[in-house]
Image (cartoon, rainbow, N blue to C red):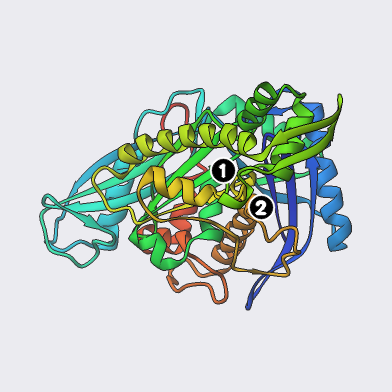
Amino acid sequence: MIAAVDIGTTRVTAVAAIATPKGVRVLGSGQSASKGIRKGTVTSISDAASSIRAAVSEAEAAAGKKIKHAMFGISGHHITGSLSSGVVGIGSGRVTQKDRMLAVRSAETIYIPIDREVLHSVPAEFIIDGHGGITDPVGMSGVRLESLLHIITADSRALQDITAAAETAGIGVLRMVFGPVAAAEALLSPAEADAGALIVDIGGGTTDVAYIRNGVLRGISVLGIGGLHLTNDLAVGLGTGIADAELIKISEGAAVLNDSGRDSVVELTVGTGPFRVKKSLISEIIRCRCEELFELVGKRMAELRSGSGLQSVIITGGTAMLPGISALASSVLNMPARVGLPNGLSGLEKGLKSTAHASAAGLLLCAAQEECGRDRDSEDQKECPGIIGKIGAGIKRITGYKDFLGTINRKKKGVSYV
């Protein structure tokens, strides 16, 4: 059995599944309101532990099995990404597997502040004698091999607090994965991952962005706007309380309103009593904030892509369920955009087949890949049958899967090593 726990600002989701030769099958899931967690950072270990325990207990009851360990999805402002490069000489004139790994190790040996910890370390590309864009250099001719490595780090204290909350809830942490990286596993087709896609994961407190191209991670960004900002805007604009504004957003909200509903008036019962408001006003408040968000995404997109191709934008997270949000994103970013629904798993209940749970679904696929990697012989580079690799498959092509697993979990006092 494999399990995943996705920690968000508004909710904690736990999912239990089994990995079989035919793929990943979900057994059960659970959700609870997030307490003691703000923008990916634990503010109260006891409250966070209670939220995790509640979600996990519900998943255990549905699955009929005990969850002892889980893959954890995290996000937050404390997570950052940067590129590092390393160079080695090609002794034999043709790149060998050893040359490739030495180049990766060279890029990996960089200074990491003692208060930071490596979450992911993924080769973005290789360069031979100045010619870049190479995903697998083995067998190619040249003199000088350079590797570009994308390293994602997180605040050590934040990770320790999440681990403490999980352990207090009785759950061991197998690994922590940045939310949109996990979501990419469940959302992208191999063609999208190769062509260049931007995952925009709109959470409650932040929006996390991941750029995938050639099947591997190319860059990340964390923006300080999330679904709760839309709720706050509605509360101020409509003169309601936060709880009522959240209900209005969920039941009547839209990023883009169709013409038929523009002049309609909705009657609601809120804390202060009966409430009448034009749908167009609700939509206008939401649209303004969403436009600001996608404009910020566009700026970060220009930085992340670094002149490389980008073909599509996939929006996920609870806020992605707002009607018209993909059309608005496409208009602001001037490229195709769609709302992403998780795939690659069987047994997803109707409630989990939602963009709000893409990270949780992706975490299960990550967990299944890791189990598969443990089961394989270290020299066997074949795909694990029935496991949808997607981003993981790209990583395996470049580094070898077990080598990759080593890179994202080893760190030594200010220096990280492959």
Spot occupied by residue 66 in the image (x, y as percentages of width and height): 84, 56
Q: Please indicate whether residue 263 sits to the left or right of residue 336 in the image.
A: right
Give the total of numbered labels. 2
Tell me if residue 187 can be seen: yes
Residue located at (62% from left, 26% from top): 233
Cα gap from disc 1 to disc 2, whole angstroms: 20 Å
**Camera-side residue: 287 or 275?**
275
Looking at the image, tell me whether mark 1 or mark 2 is earlier in sequence order: 1
* Left or right, residue 361 beside residue 189: right
Q: Residues within 10 Å of mark 1 (few under 14, many from 20)?
A: many
Percent of width and height locating residue 351:
75, 58
Task: Inspect this view and state whether residue 418 appears.
Answer: no
Q: Nearer the viewer, residue 208 or 185?
A: 208
Residue at 86% over, 60% down:
62
Residue 252: quadrant of the picture? top right
Q: Residue at x 46, y 66 (%)?
A: 189
Q: Secondary structure at mark 2?
A: helix
Quadrant containing the N terminus in the rendered view: bottom right
Name the kind of residue labelled 1 in the image: Ala
The nearer-to-camera label among 1 and 2 is: 1
Give the secondary structure at mark 1: loop
Mark number, residue 222: none
